[in-house]
Amino acid sequence: MMRNTITALILVITVLFFLGCKEQTRGSEGVVSEQIRLNQIGYYPIFIKKAVVVGVVEATEFELIEAKSGKNVFSADLSEARKWELSGEEVRIADFTDFNEEGTYQLAIAGIGQSYPFEIGKHILQAPFLGSVKGLYYQRASMALDEKFAGKWHRAAGHPDDSVSFHPSSGRTDGFLVSPKGWYDAGDYGKYVLNASFPLGQFYTLYEEYPEAIIDGDLNIPESGNGRSDYLDELKYEMDWVLTMQDEDGGMFHKLTTKGFEGMVMPDKAVSTRYVIGKGTGSTLDFAAMAAQAYRVFQTSDQDYANTCLVASRKAYQWAKDNPDVAFKNPEDISTGEYGDDDFSDEFFWAASELFVSTGDQQYLDHLKEEQLDFEMKPGDGWRRYMRFLGMFSLLRNPENVPDELLQKIRSGILASADDLVSKALEQEYFQPIDDFQWGSNSDVLNAAMIMAHAYRINPDKKYLFGAQQAVDYILGNNAVGYSFLSGFGDKTPMFLHHRPSAADGIEESVPGLLSGGPNSRLQDASNGVVYPENVAPMKAWVDQEPSYASNEICLNWNAPLTYVLGFLEQESN
């Protein structure tokens, strides 16, 4: 469902972009060239600084110039050309790591043009870091977004969810559920327990490690000024909702959605009946793990609330122990996001880890001792499998009662996994730690960076720090399509996200602070009106088109690792 008035324009722009960047730059000096790919936000002074130059390049060197004056401040040779199959390009590397002076600059290459301007400076990633969290505010359900906090993206309230019917799959037939608040999960208006709990676990991980990364007043949200971190206030808005989704027996209902996806309309216009749907082991275990984390996170600011989270966590874990293999599948009359899984070993490990850290209870440790640990991060793990790493990270942060043998196994496993990811990234021309581009590939890049970050916390070898940084460079523009994938941050960002408010609000720019999914070589939406270039290379299987749910949708579990990695870099790099 496109904005009809701009459909043709989108397709023309897409074709021109992929047929040849030289058509846009015409080789002109002083003109921004799409052939130069780099982090459009900028770089820390003493970090790696590399750009990728694509296509036929006759020049053998590049210059770094001051953006305002055009003064040449640094020059060096381009690398030898290399054919890069994953992107279908000939590429050269412009390495300006040795230049460390703070300021605003552009790369210039004779016969091609100049890059987008970027900065070198301290706290260079603070704005996108805060933006990635403020993006969650724009996803709030059940409340109006006031202009004071939302700017031009202010909107009316939608989905009060104060009397939600039970679908037969929930096991309940009578009454209604009062289930307000929470964030919309993605480009649709559904709320999903599994994909609320997993990203909350990643968000809580940042708070446990760097509690002062965001303080009261940083985000300009309605709760700003209440004496508690804006970060916790925003996370609590989601946590409040998830707690309402626990059944009386401790199990978690799977999701709260309509029977099918709504049209591309604003929240207050999406008025189809919503239902509490299903119950399953996966969502229940993810909640148990995340709620045990929430107990620790909220202890200092709200002890009663923290206790409520822990009681709910214990009940959920017990339900999962009693019902260890309840796999959720969409009922025949439901077509919203399934989040279906039938292997719960990673979820059990995460839940037992968090509950052991929070309680010290032997039963949870006994489960951990029985687990065979898997340290290989594979593209596509995401909400299905990556949560085992969250359990490992929590055990590393809280080693007091963890048996030494288990602790050492986790430390060595995380370091070995990070070493593999760093090595893989060094082999890639865009320095990203993956070479298989699936649904939500940008989150795979960032989940890998999160492992590197924790390796750095174990052993502060800068290869891990730089590996995480170059993953962020990829997200913010140093990639095969030349976009900063974070809406509103960078000179060239997604304008046509698969995101209902962005499509329906009448505002030219997308809602800011939301991460596009990224290249997806499977092209699942090609039969739904999405136009990709013919025989598109895996790294270029992304288009800035509204119907592209397979490459250009947003999702909570994509923003979560971005927030973690940006926060980590801001804390460890300054």
Image: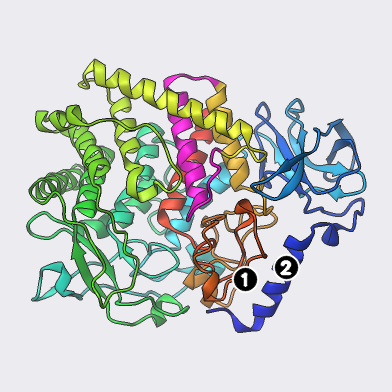
Q: What crowding class fits label 1: few (fewer than 14 Cα within 10 Å), some (14-19), or many (20 or more)?
A: some
> At 18% from the left edge and 27% from the top edge, which residue is drawn?
369
- Between the residue at mark 1 and the residue at mark 2, the CA separation in whole angstroms equals 9 Å
- The reply to whether residue 219 is visible in this rendering is no
Location of residue 521 with respect to 8 vertically, above or below? above
* Disc 1: which residue: 531
> At 62% from the left edge and 41% from the top edge, which residue is drawn?
473
Left or right, 429 with reference to 33: left
Q: Nearer the viewer, residue 51 or 326?
A: 326
- Identified by mark 1, the residue type is Val
Location of residue 419 with respect to 512 vertically, above or below? above
Left or right, 326 with reference to 475: left
**Magenta-span inclusion, residue 439:** yes
Q: Which residues are magenta?
A: 433-461
Left or right, 59 with reference to 567: right
- Identified by mark 2, the residue type is Val
> At 34% from the left edge and 82% from the top edge, which residue is drawn?
271
What secondary structure is the stretch in magenta mostly built from? Answer: helix
Q: Nearer the viewer, residue 199 or 373?
A: 373
Q: Position of residue 128 (x, y in %)?
A: 56, 48
* Disc 2: which residue: 15
Q: Position of residue 519 (x, y in %)?
A: 57, 55
